[in-house]
Image (cartoon, rainbow, N blue to C red):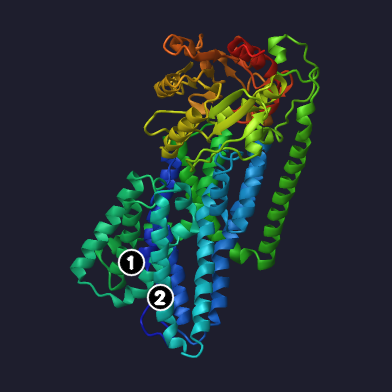
């Protein structure tokens, strides 16, 4: 990363002094990002440092342009930014596309295509916000391009800086170029304050938006712009500069290694990282200190020059290595290999200099090809999913699904349905209708299914594992005359746990408890005939399933209000060595129904754990369809030509339809309604 110092004579060509210490600081920051991402599997506050340094570089260049009489230079600044960002980005996208086709199953290609388009359009950070709140994509595995959000943010920041500079230029046409710098700095400072204020507000609300949003992140590169604006005007004693630079560098390293840079944001730690970067910049602007001299050492400067390509390459290399080895994390040795390979490939990228080897027209051609292939694959997947409308009318003889287990029906050799590409869209009607509270909300959203005019009501409550039974309940309700009212939230069963955790990342999920309290109060007020929910969860670090203590308080509250309950044993979650795996991905990669399944004893206890609590909860009626999902020894990925799971642990709607007869039989025994 090349960095420059701005001097204070605005109307003359400005002398540039190369800041090797800031280049070295970029090397330290990217090393923190790579090491934490590869070995520790988490974000690093090195990202904050990189954003501040990017703001300094862009701001320094724009300030120099505004400080001359040639404001037309802003066009040159845009070309300069494109040359810095695009060639290496396009190269990484092209190689990643080839490796995706070679290494990853087709079920992962759509997410890659979406993120390729988002990366080329520099809106990857917004795509991550949108898809994280999308039920169909919320549980997607991490993609090789997920880290490109920071590149998109940098591109958006460049455009913002140039637009702001252009507006300042227009506003000072009559006043002359001498006032441009002051007006630009004032506007940038105002934007920085506004962005930080908004980030603080979002910090207490939507944490995902706070982390990825351009509006909440802009204050960091804008802090770099401010440091570029004042660096030549601040004069500190050498002793003070030496101390602050040393403290700043120590803070950056400690925060980068010890603190998860992702949650929460912004935090005291992000403030420390940003402030430390600004302090190091200012301390070295007037002369070299020990810390600045260390940062300007040849090794760190060399690493700093590799910062951008190293950041681009480290994540795809890690993800493709994990896909190749079929692991969820790297160890010390193979992680070290990934880190070394990242440095080597980044060095080759820098030495080859794709910006010089490839003309602008060739880079544009590569962009067009990547975009065209991505849109073409998205169209192919959309066409495949459109065929999924016939899933509701599949022949019960050809696609018996659960009846192959329950009735020992003979199964013809036919292609699996839904297909691997249809699977992600084979979801309950509440998902299609968006009748589910999202990850961030605590308000209760309800819809009615089954027979809306019926007098009897079953309340379907909880998270997605309650929700996937709606497909069958809707059919049974229409057939036997009851309505199904939903009270659903993503990843959130009814719970009394003070701070619930999201399954998978196991991060705090405070909105779940707030929603659960609201939903329980609403259910008690509505007084349904029965409340239907799951009663068990898997033991993630061992075999079997269990009833969580934080479910029992819900049962107690409903019992105290005289509301009967239908408690269904949760279906197996597909786990290997304590980690989720997707049978759909496994099948797409060439596996079969057995190899893409899971041993039954790993997923389910020998006896339904719910039965141990019936004496204390006489209003609870147990339901258990485990024998309709699993064989005696294995829970397969496919039964009766029907795919059981549309992801790692949610039943496909098509398979649930084949469970309707057995669920209706058990409901009849429990309710005596028919």
In the rendered view, does 477 fall on the left or right side of 282? right
For the C terminus, the image quarter is top right
Nearer to the camera, 465 or 178: 465
* Tag 2 secondary structure: helix
Q: Which mark's residue is nearer the viewer, 1 or 2?
A: 2
Nearer to the camera, 594 or 27: 594
Q: Which mark is residue 455?
A: none
In the rendered view, does 457 fall on the left or right side of 59? right
For the point 65% across and 39% down, which residue is it?
433
Q: Which residue is mark 2?
A: 185
Q: Position of residue 442 (x, y in %)?
A: 47, 40
For the point 74% across and 25% down, which residue is it?
416
Label 2: how many Cα within 10 Å (few below 14, some 14–19, many 20+):
many
For the N terminus, the image quarter is bottom left
- 96 in relation to 489, above or below: below
Examine the image and state in which quarter residue 553 appears.
top left
* Tag 1 secondary structure: helix
Q: Which residue is mark 1?
A: 281
- 248 in relation to 442, above or below: below
For the point 25% across and 59% down, which residue is it?
246
Q: Position of residue 73 (x, y in %)?
A: 54, 80
Q: Position of residue 356 (x, y in %)?
A: 60, 66
Nearer to the camera, 606 or 92: 606
Q: CA distance from mark 1 to mark 2?
A: 17 Å
């Amino acid at each position: 990363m090349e960095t420059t110092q701005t001097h204070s004579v605005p109307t003359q060509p400005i002398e540039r002094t190369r800041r090797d210490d800031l280049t070295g600081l970029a090397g330290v920051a990217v090393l923190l990002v790579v090491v934490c991402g590869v070995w520790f599997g988490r974000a690093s506050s090195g990202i904050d440092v990189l954003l501040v340094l990017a703001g300094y570089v862009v701001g320094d260049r724009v300030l120099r342009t505004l400080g001359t009489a040639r404001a037309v230079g802003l066009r040159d600044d845009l070309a300069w930014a494109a040359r810095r960002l695009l060639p290496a980005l396009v190269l990484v996208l092209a190689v990643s596309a080839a490796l995706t086709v070679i290494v990853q199953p087709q079920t992962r290609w759509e997410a890659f295509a979406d993120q390729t388009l988002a990366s080329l359009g520099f809106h990857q950070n917004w795509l991550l916000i949108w898809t994280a709140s999308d039920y169909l994509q919320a549980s997607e595995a991490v993609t090789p391009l997920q880290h490109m959000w920071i590149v998109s943010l940098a591109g958006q920041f460049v455009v913002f800086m140039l637009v702001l500079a252009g507006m300042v230029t227009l506003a000072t046409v009559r006043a002359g170029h001498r006032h441009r710098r002051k007006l630009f700095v004032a506007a940038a400072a105002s934007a920085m304050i506004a962005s930080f204020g908004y980030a603080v507000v979002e910090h207490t609300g939507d944490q995902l938006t706070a982390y990825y949003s351009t509006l909440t992140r802009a204050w960091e590169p804008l802090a770099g712009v401010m440091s570029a604006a004042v660096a030549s005007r601040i004069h500190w004693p050498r002793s003070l500069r030496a101390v602050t630079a040393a403290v700043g560098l120590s803070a950056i390293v400690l925060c980068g290694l010890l603190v998860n840079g992702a949650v929460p944001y912004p935090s005291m730690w992000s403030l420390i990282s940003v402030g430390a970067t600004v302090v190091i910049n200012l301390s070295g602007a007037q002369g070299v200190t020990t810390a600045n001299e260390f940062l300007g050492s040849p090794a760190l400067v060399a690493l700093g020059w590799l910062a951008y390509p190293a950041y681009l390459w480290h994540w795809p290399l890690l993800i493709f290595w994990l896909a190749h080895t079929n692991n969820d994390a790297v160890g010390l040795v193979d992680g070290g290999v990934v880190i070394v390979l990242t440095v080597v490939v980044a060095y080759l990228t820098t030495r080859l200099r794709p910006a010089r080897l490839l003309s602008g027209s060739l880079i544009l051609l590569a962009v067009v090809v990547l975009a065209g292939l991505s849109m073409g694959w998205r169209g192919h997947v959309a066409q495949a999913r459109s065929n999924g409308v016939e899933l509701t009318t599949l022949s019960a003889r050809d696609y018996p699904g659960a009846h192959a287990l329950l009735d020992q029906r003979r199964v013809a050799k036919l292609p699996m349905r839904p297909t691997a590409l249809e699977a992600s869209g084979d979801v309950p009607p509440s998902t299609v209708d968006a009748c589910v509270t999202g990850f961030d909300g605590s308000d209760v959203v309800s819809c009615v299914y089954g027979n809306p005019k019926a007098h009897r009501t079953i309340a379907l409550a909880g998270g997605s594992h309650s929700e996937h039974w709606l497909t069958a309940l809707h059919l049974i309700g229409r057939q036997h005359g009851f309505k199904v009212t939903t009270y659903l939230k993503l990843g959130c069963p009814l719970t009394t746990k003070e701070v619930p955790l999201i399954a998978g990342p196991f991060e705090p999920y405070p909105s779940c408890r707030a929603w659960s309290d609201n939903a329980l109060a609403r259910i008690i007020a509505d007084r349904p005939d029965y409340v239907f929910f799951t009663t068990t969860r898997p033991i993630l670090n061992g075999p079997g399933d269990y009833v969580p203590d934080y479910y029992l308080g819900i049962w107690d509250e409903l019992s105290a209000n005289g509301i009967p309950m239908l408690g269904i044993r949760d279906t197996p979650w597909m786990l290997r060595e304590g980690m989720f795996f997707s049978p759909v991905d496994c099948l797409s990669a060439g596996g079969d129904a057995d190899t893409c399944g899971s041993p039954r004893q790993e997923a389910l206890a020998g006896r339904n754990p719910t039965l141990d609590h019936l004496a204390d909860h006489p209003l609870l009626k147990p339901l258990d369809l485990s024998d309709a999902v699993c064989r005696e020894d294995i829970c397969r990925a496919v039964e009766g030509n029907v795919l059981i799971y549309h992801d790692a642990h949610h039943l496909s709607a098509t398979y649930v339809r084949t469970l309707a007869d057995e669920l209706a039989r058990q409901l009849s025994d429990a309710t005596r309604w028919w």
